[in-house]
Image (tube, helix red, strand yellow):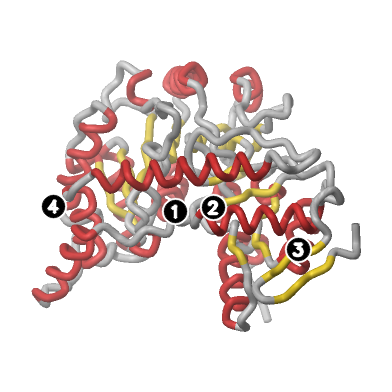
Amino acid sequence: MSLSHLAQSIATSPTMALNEQARLLRERGEAVIHLGIGEPKNKAPINAILSGAARLSSGDVKYSPADGIPSLKKAIIRYTEDNYGVTVAPENVIVTSGAKQSVFNILYTILNPQDEVIVLAPYWVSYPEIVKMVFGTPAIVTPEDGSFIPRMADVERAIGRNTKAIIVNSPNNPSGVVYPEELIAAIVETCERKGIYLIMDDIYHKLVFDGRHAPPCYQFTDKDVEDSRLIVVNGVAKLYGMTGFRVGWTIAPRRLVEIMTNVQSQMTSCVSVLLQAAAEGALTGMQSLVESLRLTIQNNRDVTLQELKAFDGVRVTPPEGTFYCLPDFRAYNGDSVALAKFLLDRALVVTVPGKEFGIEGHLRLSYAGTVKDVTEGIARIRWALDPNSPNEIYIGDRRMVRDWV
């Protein structure tokens, strides 16, 4: 069978693969705990459900404009004004099938073969693969001091004659860190001065803790959206717990949005009008649920950090946002892929290897689920790894005895 070399070079999404593995284990009746999942447990907002249901009940379910229905774009414009302090036109907005498609459409639109995109490690697993899918080259910048925040000097050293864009995700998946204002300001200034696109993946921008604030990139430029090199990606998936609705959007200069719209029209045509109506309901409905979700996630973060303190040798940088942390497990095993497989086989706990995010020796743990999932999942991990932990544990209704430490 003859297949595309490029397609075969694209890695399987580890998070999607783990979701499927967890589902199959549960179907077999195994007491698996999923600490790899990237979605909160809350139900979709009632306004989103009612808006989508009203559209369905009307029977008016047809094609929409490729760049999104006008009423949803109006809601996105209002959201952008409220949260970013800038006014944009409908022509600066395109609605996509999730923030992931936004990133793909942007890179497909701006890159020529062999153009480079700087990706800051730790990074979301899909960034390098999407860059490669559109014939670009990812240039990874990894902090050398053991932290999860790159130095601006390292970013500048990575910029070359083929650099076309920098992708920034803050609050950061997988580490949970929020990049400091001075770093965002320096990246914005550099991109504007050198004519490099800055792609801000802001999907977690309001899921921050302890009074922190994820600074919007627009506050660091005196250019308007039309003349700027700044591109902002967002969506309803994380903030409203609507991961299955697959609605995201991009704010960008008109010419870029125009080309992205052409690209999207030849791929998916448009986002389902039912899902767009639901997203509009979320954006225009009561926003108190966002704060309620944020507080729940912050409490889960606190429980996670408390439970991880029981580990000897495990180091963790306290997350300042998202619903992930990225503890360092090198005291037990420097091979994160082998370690994640071991924990799934022995303890029935799903984690995501840090290698997939560009940081080996770490595991990404999600606290987006319940407090029970967090406490029991970490207890199982400790039982499997830490010789100072109790030798016996119950996993489901089975009594397990550790005989390998």
User: Relative to residue 263, is residue 134 drawn left or right?
Assistant: right
Q: What element carries label 3?
A: helix
> As shown in the figure, which amino acid type bears the numbered disc 2?
Ile
Q: Distance between the residues labelled 1 and 4?
A: 22 Å
Upstream in the sequence, badge 4 or badge 2? 4
Label 2 packing within 10 angstroms: few (<14), some (14-19), many (20+): many
- Tell me what residue is drawn at x 34 percent, y 66 percent: 268
Q: Which residue, given by chain and number where applicable, does mark 3 sit on? A: 341
Nearer to me, 378 or 119: 378
CB atoms of marks 3 and 4 within 8 Å: no
Does residue 165 appear in this view?
no
Upstream in the sequence, badge 3 or badge 2? 2
Give the image quarter of residue 177.
top right
Q: Which residue, given by chain and number where applicable, does mark 1 sit on? A: 100
Q: Residue 130 carries which label?
A: 2
> As shown in the figure, which amino acid type bears the numbered disc 3?
Lys
Q: Which residue, given by chain and number where applicable, does mark 4 sit on? A: 71
